[in-house]
Image (cartoon, rainbow, N blue to C red):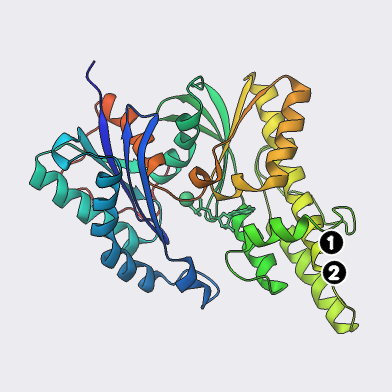
Amino acid sequence: DEDVYILAIESSCDETAAAVVKNGREVLSNVISSQIALHTLYGGVVPEIASRKHIEKINQVIREALKEASMTLEEMTAIAVTYGPGLVGALLVGVAEAKAIAYAAKKPLVGVHHIEGHVSANFIEHPDLEPPFVCLIVSGGHTHLVIVKDYGEFEIIGRTMDDAAGEAFDKVARAVGLGYPGGPKVDKAAKEGNPHAMEFPRAKVGGSAYDFSFSGMKSAVLNYINQAQMKGEEICVPDLAASFQNAVVDVLVSRAVAAAKEYGYDKLAIAGGVASNSALRAGMKAACEKEGIRFYYPSQIFCTDNAAMIGAAGYYEYINGARAGWDLNAVPNLKL
Ligand code: KG4
Ligand code: ZN
């Protein structure tokens, strides 16, 4: 039972990140170089720019992560890296870097699923949280409701049929001129608005009871904006933001809590960028309290993309014996 130190690398989208994590739960460093300012110019992530920026930053970010942890590469037990899902060019930068470091330093290499990383962000600040539990993963690219049966073992019970939750936030924000990334902007604007000012549909078509659909809701918001513009009416952005957010949160909370009850779990966690949404956190907290379910969520810094969560997931993969070969490749549409 020696301590396990994981050097983790994450580059699946627009954050170049590295972290040192001890025994899966203790974050010794968590360095994130965000490209958001660059992509804001284009209203979204430009894959080619993302890859180039990762190449520029990755060595520096890794050096900083080791320095902040006051540790050397020699002292690391293993190297963990996100190998999918994500943008292929962006992922490749992290994967190639991790392979080079692991080979040169003669360390084992562990490939980590990005979504497993998001889920594992919950282990960092909650020493008492252990599987099994239900987890709602809501990010810019993913909306999944899963049962975390064991470390690294998931059963997907619901997913989005169309847009991801974060994508819907981003599109609505763009339509009302709030800019990119839209989630935090909508969250902020909604604080000044009335969540009952407008009624947006919660309806869901097909799929299982725990599947999601956000494109109808998003279209309703876009229609509302178009009609107001045609009539020359002013749109109250805070009211619109609050009403849209309320509709999304309603659906996410009711399905996640219903799943925990039906499958008989008394622990529910949220993960991914949208998990930092203040209304989602408040709504989940209230609903879970009412149902006697323990509710877990990561700090904001561990909700959006970071490498500490990859280090947490990488630790459990490592102690379960997972090892990647030198042929590890980026898998843009990697399944959970
Ligand atoms: O997990 P993440 O950093 O990247 C992906 O793996 O996709 O999630 C980014 C997404 C974006 O869509 C962003 O708008 C959303 O998370 N997001 C939020 C908030 N903060 C970030 N959505 C709603 N409310 C927030 N406070
Ligand atoms: Zn992510």
- In the picture as drawn, the residue positioned furthest to the top comes out as 1
Q: Residue at x 21, y 36 (%)?
A: 78
Residue 225 sits in which quadrant?
A: bottom right
Please provide percent x and percent y for residue 55: 26, 65
The answer to whether 279 appears left or right of 311 in the picture is right
Do the numbered discs 2 and 1 sit on residues whose CB atoms are within 8 Å?
Answer: yes
Q: Which type of secondary structure does the marked residue at label 2 adopt?
A: loop
Residue 166 sits in which quadrant?
A: bottom right
Between marks 2 and 1, how big is the CA–CA gap? 5 Å
Quadrant of the rendering where the N terminus is positioned: top left
Q: Which residue is mark 1?
A: 239
The answer to whether 124 appears left or right of 70 in the picture is right
- Checking the image for residue 222, the label placed there is none
Relative to the observer, which residue lies in front, 250 or 304?
Answer: 304
Quadrant of the rendering where the C terminus is positioned: top left
Q: Which residue is mark 2?
A: 236
Please provide percent x and percent y for residue 90: 34, 62
Q: Which type of secondary structure does the marked residue at label 1 adopt?
A: helix
* On screen, residue 217 above or below 179: above
Q: Residue at x 65, y 71 (%)?
A: 174
Whether the residue under disc 2 has CB within 8 Å of ligand 1: no
Residue type at mark 1: give it: Asp
Q: Residue at x 42, y 48 (%)?
A: 306
- Label 2 CA crowd tier, 10 Å (few <14, some 14–19, many 20+): few
Residue 84 seen in the current view: yes
Residue type at mark 2: give it: Cys
